[in-house]
Amino acid sequence: MIKVVQYINQFFANVGGEEMAHIPAEVRTEIVGPGLAFQQAFKDEAKIVATIVCGDSYFNENLEEAKKTILEMIKEYNPDLFIAGPAFNAGRYGVACATIAAEVKEQLNIPVLTGMYKENPGADMFKNKVYIVSTKNSAVGMKDAVKKMAPLALKLAKGEKILSSAEEGYLPNGIRVNFFEKERGSKRAVNMLLSKLQDKEFETEFPMPDFDRVEPNKAVKDITKAKIALVTSGGIVPKGNPDHIESSSASKFGKYDIDGVMDLTEETYETAHGGYDPVYANLDADRVLPVDILREFEQQGKIGSLHRYFYTTVGNGTAVKSSKAFAAEFSKELKQDGIDAVILTST
């Protein structure tokens, strides 16, 4: 019997939502959440002997401690296989699943598997390190995810040959495998071209990346009369990070009043970002969010005025879908406040 340990977050363990994302890792000997579907799919070939539950915020904000603790928990059960998730399109959950799966693979040398939506930041970060089954973007796709993950998990545990990503359902991991096609490439290419010309469905053998293109706006007519706002993905927040914006895979953004603030000092501002060395940003947050120089420009008449609020989040590992949602929300406020231009800073 193949012994399996599974990792899930607080939501799928029915502990709670975002309000319980702070809980540290704990072990449950009973089968929990998606484990029920996996156990049914495994039949009598494998058994889930333990489920590790950990809050998304706790894992990402206490990364080294969380990894160490979870590894010790897994060792106690000496499993033949480790499964994380599936995480679908939950950014912090996806990063946690992929991170701990990679750690288990490297430190414990046992087969690992996770699953998530292709646009989950965890997928982009770890698809070349661990097998990540491609899932739908929400838990509505749980049945489909388990259907693909369970057979691949058993093959990994048994040490069987893993076929191509197209055949097994995992995200392409950069490994090319030679195989024989029934028809030569020239014929397949012509057939695809004919299908395209006739508006018929076809599937390319070389998928191209889908880049989001944003047309630039027209130049500001008179910058000396313009109302300028600051937005940053560099994580600059008031000291203490009052809204608890996550250091990675942010689930929120902050809006802060800088009316009358001339300089972002070490005593009053810091960065919540976990993807770069924070030392220089913490010493002088103006290096990421240039309030000081814009105040000078304001006094010199080089710009009309600086907006009294700035918007901030953390770009590190944050899903594109989440980023777009943040921008859509605060852009409405910026328009209502009569902003003429926005300076968007990164790290």
Image: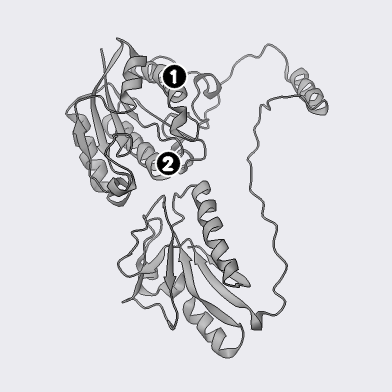
**Residue at image point 37% right, 58% down:** 245
Residue type for callout 2: Ala
Disc 1 crowd, CA 10 A, few/some/many (<14, 14-19, 20+)? some
- Please state which of residues 108 and 331 is positioned toward the viewer in this rendering: 331
* Residue 186 numbered tag: none
Alpha carbon distance from label 1 to label 2: 20 Å
* Residue 90 numbered tag: 2
The image quarter containing residue 256 is: bottom left
Residue 242 in view = yes
- Please state which of residues 274 and 238 is positioned toward the viewer in this rendering: 238
71 sits left or right of 36 in the view = left
Q: Position of residue 74 (x, y in %)?
A: 22, 31
Secondary structure found at label 2: loop
Q: Which residue is mark 1?
A: 147
Extreme residue toward the front, this view: 336
Q: Quadrant of the N terminus?
A: top left
Q: Position of residue 325 (x, y in %)?
A: 52, 52
The image quarter containing residue 155 is: top left
Extreme residue toward the bottom, this view: 300
* Nearer-N-terminus badge (1/2): 2
Q: How many marks?
A: 2
**Residue at image point 58% right, 75% down:** 228
Assess whether mark 2 and mark 1 are in contact (beta carbons under 8 angstroms). Answer: no
Relative height, residue 24 to residue 37 (above, below): below
Q: Position of residue 29 (x, y in %)?
A: 19, 26
**Residue at image point 43% right, 38% down:** 126
Q: Position of residue 185 (x, y in %)?
A: 73, 20
Secondary structure found at label 1: helix
